[in-house]
Image (cartoon, rainbow, N blue to C red):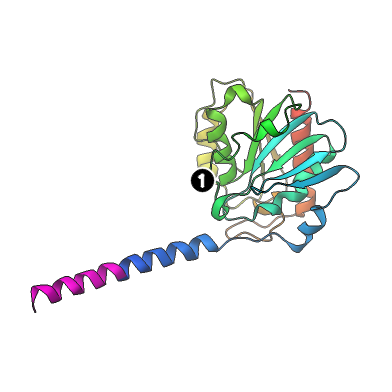
């Protein structure tokens, strides 16, 4: 076999490997949990909140009265962000301005700084929190670690912080379901040391990993004994209990 033939064969093999890897990555990125059809019913104005969709994909849930505080929310990994609209509506109904952020390929790891500049859209809101579900919570924690002077706190839903926030004054609220089969409990316990000593923790009895949104069952999750609506309502109560007017 000539040297030229060997080079052509080598090039063909490399090209085949590259195409295979790229195809695999694209299949992975395009496979996600879509929001339930029910979610569309929460994407409209009601007596308690107005819905504003920005051109950059951010959806604002604005309370009808003057908001008491604001929340920037990152969705869970590979979950369509609108799946969290029902939770945002519940919070907005209690006076929390919620900004739900769309992520590239439904993965917050690709834009952990998506919150940057969003507070400027609502200059009259004095207190801001950032939060997220699962991977979104971890990325929200990462953002919070370098913007502690701009935020009042962090909300973790079935998530943990790998960033060290222990020396900050952030008001951190951590919530997860007792039947969560996706959250790495060992890692969760290990990372508690990264949170301020006075962080608040809530366990929703009967709740699961996917119960913070409306996107159906999640692979590897536990069997919930309460429905998603109940879990989101309880989560909203815990959040509002902590962030309204500060701790």
Against 197, residue 76 (above or below) is: below
Against 215, residue 129 (above or below) is: above
Residue, disc 1 = 109
Instruction: Locate residue 144 relative to residue 175 in the image: left or right.
Output: left
In the image, is residue 14 part of the stretch drawn in magenta?
yes
Q: Quadrant of the C terminus?
A: top right
Asked whether residue 186 appears in the rendered view, the answer is yes
The residue drawn where x is 88% and y is 42% is 48
**What segment carries the magenta color?**
1-15
Q: Position of residue 145 (x, y in %)?
A: 53, 29
Q: Position of residue 116 (x, y in %)?
A: 59, 34
Q: Position of residue 224 (x, y in %)?
A: 70, 55
Q: Quadrant of the N terminus?
A: bottom left
The part of the image, by quadrant, that contains residue 117 is: top right
Element at badge 1? Answer: helix
Q: Position of residue 13 (x, y in %)?
A: 25, 71
Instruction: Locate residue 73 relative to residue 60 in the image: left or right.
Output: left
The residue drawn where x is 74% and y is 39% is 98
Query: Mark 1 packing: few (<14 Cα in 10 Å), some, or many (20+)?
Result: some
């Amino acid at each position: 076999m000539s040297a030229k033939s060997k080079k052509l064969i080598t090039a063909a093999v490399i090209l085949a490997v590259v195409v295979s890897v790229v195809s695999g990555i694209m299949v992975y990125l395009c496979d996600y949990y879509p929001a339930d059809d029910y979610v569309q019913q929460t994407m409209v104005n009601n007596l308690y909140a107005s819905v504003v969709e920005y051109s950059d994909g951010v959806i604002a849930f604005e309370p009808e009265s003057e908001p008491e505080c604001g929340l920037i929310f990152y969705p869970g990994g590979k979950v369509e962000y609108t799946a969290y609209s029902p939770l945002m509506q519940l919070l907005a109904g209690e006076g929390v301005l919620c900004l739900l952020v769309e992520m590239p390929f439904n993965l917050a790891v690709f834009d952990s700084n998506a919150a940057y500049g969003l507070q400027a859209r609502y200059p009259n809101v004095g207190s801001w929190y950032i939060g997220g579900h699962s991977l979104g919570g971890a990325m929200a924690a990462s953002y919070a670690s370098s913007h502690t002077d701009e935020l009042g706190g962090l909300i973790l839903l079935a998530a943990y912080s790998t960033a060290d926030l222990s020396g900050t004054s952030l008001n951190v609220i951590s919530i997860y379901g007792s039947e969560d089969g996706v959250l790495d409990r060992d890692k969760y316990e290990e990372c508690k040391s990264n949170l301020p000593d006075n962080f608040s923790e809530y366990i929703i009895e009967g709740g699961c990993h996917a119960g913070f949104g409306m996107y159906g069952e999640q692979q590897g999750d536990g069997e919930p004994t309460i429905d998603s609506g109940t879990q989101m309502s309880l989560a909203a109560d815990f959040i509002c209990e902590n962030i309204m007017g500060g701790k």
